Amino acid sequence: MAELVVALDFKDAKSALSMAESLKGTATWMKVGLELFTAEGPTVVKGLKEMGFKVFLDLKFFDIPNTVQGAIRSAARLGVDMVNIHALGGERMAKAAMAGCAEGVEPGEEPPLVLAVTMLTSMAAGDLPVDGAPEPSEMALDLAVKAKQYGLNGVVCSGLEAERIKAACGSDFIALTPGIRPADSAGDDQRRVVTPAQAVRNGSGFLVVGRPITGASSPAEAARAILAEMDSA
Ligand code: C5P
């Protein structure tokens, strides 16, 4: 059963927590990203955990292995349920992330899932500033296969790539997909988008949705409509 993750891209904790409050009983997962975490830090994560949400800390770590190990250790200590790094950081960085994850939890405690970002869903062919770069979908697949080999729990990818990634990496390997747009909504800055139903049919285990929910006149209604579409896929 695929899960809905609501992206709380807000400038302060007050707005984010009030949006989360309005989604209580509808969504289970909230995502804290760069804007909100840079403004409010761990306090907002603790607030969401106290409200009973599962938290995906989406800071897309990409640094030398020692620094990423420490950052993931801190995230695990903070009690987040999911965290991510960039697959482009390679094997040593990925393995350091998994080591940090194990160090950050007490014995018997469930560690957070560690996912690797393959290619941002806002990037289309030609956006990668590298001459002769492969197509984003091909690159996402190659990076996912490597992330699996490095021992990560899954990847962040477009719903367009989820099916091939699941076929190559196995059904237990998580595909989390942002870039979700209900058929009648704006694409915003996203490029490699799919509808909620397409994402589920393609094997996505977690659908990350921000503006189509947080920008709706009734966020709870928008979330319920997306969940209904996911259920009927
Ligand atoms: O508002 P929207 O639905 O486009 O939000 C998507 C969220 O997913 C944003 O918080 C963005 O940072 C995040 N994300 C993404 N593409 C990735 C990884 C994360 O859009 N590859």
Image (tube, rainbow, N blue to C red):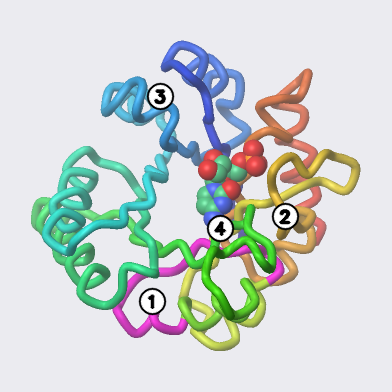
Q: CA distance from mark 3 to mark 4?
A: 30 Å
Q: Residue at x 10, y 51 (%)?
A: 106
Please, what is the three-letter code of the amino acid marked with disc 2? Arg
Q: Quadrant of ligand 1?
A: top right
| Residue 150 in the image, given as x and y percentages of width and height | 30, 79
| Residue 146 in the image, given as x and y percentages of width and height | 39, 82
> Local crowd at mark 3 within 10 Å, few (<14), some, or many (≥20)?
few
Is residue 5 visible in the rendered structure shown here? no
Residue marked by disc 1? 147
Q: On screen, 142 above or below 86? A: below
Please, what is the three-letter code of the amino acid marked with disc 4? Leu
Report whether the residue tagged 4 is closer than 8 Å to ligand 1.
yes
Q: CA distance from mark 3 to mark 1?
A: 32 Å
In this picture, residue 86 sits left or right of residue 215 = left
| Residue 28 in the image, given as x and y percentages of width and height | 52, 39
The secondary element bearing badge 2 is classed as: loop
The secondary element bearing badge 4 is classed as: loop
Which quadrant would the C terminus be assigned to in this image? bottom right
Residue marked by disc 2? 191
Please, what is the three-letter code of the amino acid marked with disc 3? Met
Residue marked by disc 4? 120
The secondary element bearing badge 1 is classed as: helix
What span is colored magenta in the figure? 145-160
The reply to whether callout 3 and callout 1 are in contact (CB within 8 Å) is no
Observer-nearest residue: 188 or 217?
188
Q: CA distance from mark 2 to mark 4?
A: 9 Å
Name the disc covering residue 36, or none. Answer: none
In this picture, residue 62 sits left or right of residue 168 = left
Which quadrant would the N terminus be assigned to in this image? bottom right
Viewer-side label of 3, 1: 1
The secondary element bearing badge 3 is classed as: loop
